[in-house]
Amino acid sequence: MECAYPFETISINKIKKGKWSLHHDLSVVPPSSLIDSIKEFGLFHPPVVRKTGTEFELVCGHTRLELYKHFFSCTFLACKVIPANSSIRAILRVVIEDQLLSGSLTPIMAARLL
């Protein structure tokens, strides 16, 4: 069975902010526990992006991407890549699944999804 969404190593400069974030109005200050965990073990759950021509639109993982930009000297990051022609429904399913890995949806996040 083939992996539904492949990993691809992408230049961080080619990843552009997307419209899918459930946290778009929150400051991006990653918890120190996340920084320490990544330093020790690496990133277990990579950002999800959608290919848009020669660039990539960030779908999930805004905090993770910002963490790599500002706290680590990385220029490339492994990401899950969903197809450019993914339906809105498919993208929202990815957003929900990604968020549920961190915990339940808050009422505000659920409202944003609607």
Image (cartoon, rainbow, N blue to C red):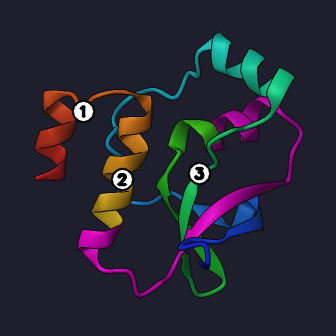
- Residue placed at 61% from the left, 79% from the top? 2
In this figure, which residue is indicated by the disc labeled 2? 95
**In this rendering, would 68 be left or right of 102?**
right
Please identify the quarter of the rendering in which residue 79 is found: bottom right
Do the CB atoms of the residues marked 3 and 2 lie less than 8 Å apart?
no
Q: Is residue 103 magenta?
A: no
CB atoms of marks 3 and 1 within 8 Å: no
Q: Position of residue 96 (x, y in %)?
A: 31, 49
Q: How far apart are the two marked residues, 1 and 2, measured between alpha carbons?
A: 11 Å
- Under circle 3, the secondary element is loop
Vertically, is 54 above or below 25? below
Asked if labels 2 and 1 touch by Cβ distance under 8 angstroms, the answer is: no
Does label 3 or label 2 sit earlier along the sequence?
A: 3
Give the camera-side residue of 109 and 73. 109
Residue lying at 80% horizontally and 34% vertically, measured from the top left:
42
Q: How far apart are marks 3 and 2 (CA)?
A: 11 Å
Sequence-first tag of 3 and 1: 3
Q: Can residue 19 be seen in this view?
A: no
- Residue 47 position, x and y percent, is 59, 51
Find the magenta span and give its range: 65-90
Residue kind at label 2, given as amino acid type: Val
